[in-house]
Amino acid sequence: MIDIGKLYCDGTSTGDGLRYGTESKADAHGNAPHRVEKDASQRRPIVVWNTTRTCNLKCVHCYTDSENRKYSNELTTKEALKLIDELSDFGIPSLLFSGGEPFMREDLFKLLEYAARKNVRPVISTNGTLIDRETAQRVKDSGVVYVGISLDGLESINDRFRGVEGAFTRTMKGFDNCRAVNQRVGLRLTLTKRNYEDLHGIFDFIEKEGINRACFYHLVYSGRGSSMYEDDLSHGESRHAMDIILQRTDDYFRRGLDINILTVDNHADGVYLYLKMKEQNREGAEDVYSLLKWNGGAANSSGVGIANIDFNGNVHPDQFWQDYTFGNIRERNFGDIWMDERDPLMHGLKHKKDFIKGRCKLCRFRDLCTGSMRVRGYRAYGDFWAPDPQCYLTDAEIGLDEEKRRYLKEIGEEFPIPSELAR
């Protein structure tokens, strides 16, 4: 995650200690902050747990390809409670209950309450359509620290994206019900060609509705989102989207609005933000460089600071890489699986700087990004260590001159940018 308010506007949020090793205000955005980590490479992973594959919607970009039906072999309540014990013992900073749609799981509240008692900071990722007032109160009472509700555009755009008419209205009722009981809640939006042109409208909507946290995700090629470039933003569109995000976040801060804006799944955003600050002679640019370097980008994300456990108990590098499994928690303890570097991909993910190829290897900002999303590079080129095709930074910006391009060609690491993205 790139915390735009923290980096670009000198703000603060609950994740400062986890992402940047700095103190945050005790009441930052209405919640107790994460502990301050001494070294990003040594932190335990935030675990995204797909509690069920069943979902009441059919989103066009769903990375689990979920539908509204029952699936076999999902973890039982007993197995789920044992998993939470293991995650607590391993010292994870947070457990994200995801899906499918987590509210489709009948024992969800029992699991949430248990996770809260075990101090793993339960978080929910949901489409929000099933959160009535009673459900919102139960979420609050169970100890959930944050509810992230997906909304991928305004009204008709969202409904087309979600595959169900009326989803927008039901999702907004879910927002309202969470706010009514003082449950910390925010917006999650995946940037695609279907919604990015309405970004200003989305920022207007965030302010109008009193939403105090929004995460803008870059598309990752997985599940029903594996069509890759069909819905993804071109490099030019990604830069334009970032310009809008920076501009509107800055406007929020200048007017004293407490709205936490983040971008997710593309560490090039951090470098782009830093370069913009330099271009604008904005105060604090070198401090931002230091914070991004401490974070390490992808060096400390998939395989280190982010983990995924699917509905059947399989452990994956992240939630978008469910076709590669390190082991199953029914057979081995999660911590043992996660720290076992005998698997070549797990070893590489924990030492990404030694393996990334192409323009990523020679990038002058390698320490800030470290190759970004490995799964996107793999989907595009069939190579774990190939460059992320959604890096929208130019050769000039990353210091890739003609001599370096010739070198990459000589060693077979050109990896041409797909024409659909290069615009």
Image: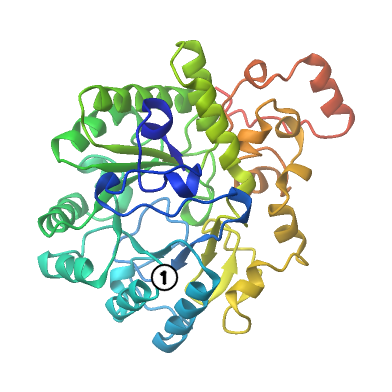
Q: Position of residue 194 (x, y in %)?
A: 36, 36
Q: Position of residue 153 (x, y in %)?
A: 28, 40
Q: Amino acid at mark 1?
A: Arg
Q: Along the line of sight, which residue is nearer the eye, 24 or 422?
A: 24
Q: Along the line of sight, which residue is nearer the eye, 55 or 262?
A: 262
The total number of labels drawn is 1
Q: Position of residue 378 (x, y in %)?
A: 67, 48
| Residue lying at the far bottom of the rendered structure | 78
In this image, 375 relative to 34: left or right? right
In this image, 348 relative to 303: left or right? right
Residue 60 drawn above or below residue 343: above
Q: Residue at x 51, y 31 (%)?
A: 270
Task: Answer yes or no: is residue 389 visible.
Answer: no
Q: Residue at x 20, y 30 (%)?
A: 204
Q: Which residue is mark 1?
A: 53
Q: Along the line of sight, which residue is nearer the eye, 300 or 319?
A: 300
Q: Position of residue 245 (x, y in %)?
A: 36, 28
Quarter placement of the C terminus: top right
Q: Residue at x 73, y 42 (%)?
A: 353
Judged from the image, the secondary structure of the residue bearing numbered disc 1 is loop
Q: Along the line of sight, which residue is nearer the eye, 279 or 228?
A: 279
Q: Residue at x 28, y 70 (%)?
A: 103
